[in-house]
Structures are given as C-alpha cells and as structure tokens.
Image (cartoon, rainbow, N blue to C red):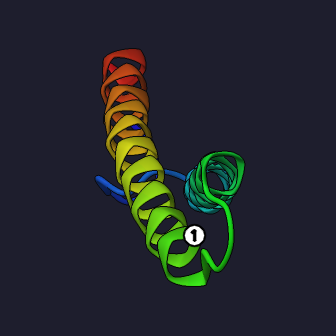
Amino acid sequence: MSDRPLSALPSRGARIVAFVSILAAGTAGGTIGYALVGVQCDGDCATSSGIAMLIGAVSFAAGMAVVAVLGLRAMGEWRERGDQ
C-alpha cells in the first residue's frame, strides 16, 4: 500500500510545463497575427495590428490550453492504471 495521499492533481512539474506552453503558444499567436496584418496593410495600421495580435494570442493560447488539459488528464489516467 502506498503512503502517498490520493490526488487528482498532476505533478507540479507537469502543471508548470503546461502553463509555460500556453504562454508560448499565446506569444506565437500574437506574433503571427501582428505579422499577417503588417504584411497586408499600408499606412497607419496600429489598431488593425493590435486587434490581430489579440485575436491570434487568445486563439492560440485557448487551443494550447485544450491540448494541455487533455495531456494532463491522460497523464493522470496513466498514473492511475500504473498504481493498480
């Protein structure tokens, strides 16, 4: 019998990796959104670039958050099966 308390939380390291990957994806999405508007726009494009950066950052971060949650849940299930 294990002395470890039962917990559904993933390890601290896994949660840190998931958080950093969400931040990295948001940064990449913001950069891509900004660059796409920068390539297509002439003149004053500050508002357009800002909106595109925001949309890109939020959408990429949300997508990565879904992937991170699914990965953390899979790790929890694998750990549970290994404990049996």
Residue 12 can be seen in this image: no
Q: Residue at x 41, y 40 (%)?
A: 72
How far from the left and from the top, in percent, is residue 65? 39, 50
Above or below for 20 versus 77: below
Which residue is identified by label 1? 49
* Residue found farthest to the front: 43
Say how many tags the image has. 1
Q: Secondary structure at mark 1?
A: helix
Q: Residues within 10 Å of mark 1 (few under 14, many from 20)?
A: many
How far from the left and from the top, in percent, is residue 37? 59, 55
For this view, does 9 lie left or right of residue 22? left
Q: Nearest the camera: 32 or 19?
A: 32
For this view, does 15 lie left or right of residue 32? left
How far from the left and from the top, in percent, is residue 7? 32, 57
How far from the left and from the top, in percent, is residue 32? 64, 47
Q: Nearest the camera: 49 or 7?
A: 49
Residue 34 can be seen in this image: yes
For this view, does 13 lie left or right of residue 82? right
Q: Nearest the camera: 28 or 71?
A: 28
Q: Amino acid at mark 1?
A: Ser
Q: Nearest the camera: 50 or 20?
A: 50
Above or below for 48 versus 40: below
Q: Residue at x 32, y 42 (%)?
A: 66
Q: Residue at x 35, y 53 (%)?
A: 62
Above or below for 47 versus 8: below
Give the quarter of the figure containing the C terminus. Answer: top left
Give the quarter of the figure containing the N terminus. Answer: top left
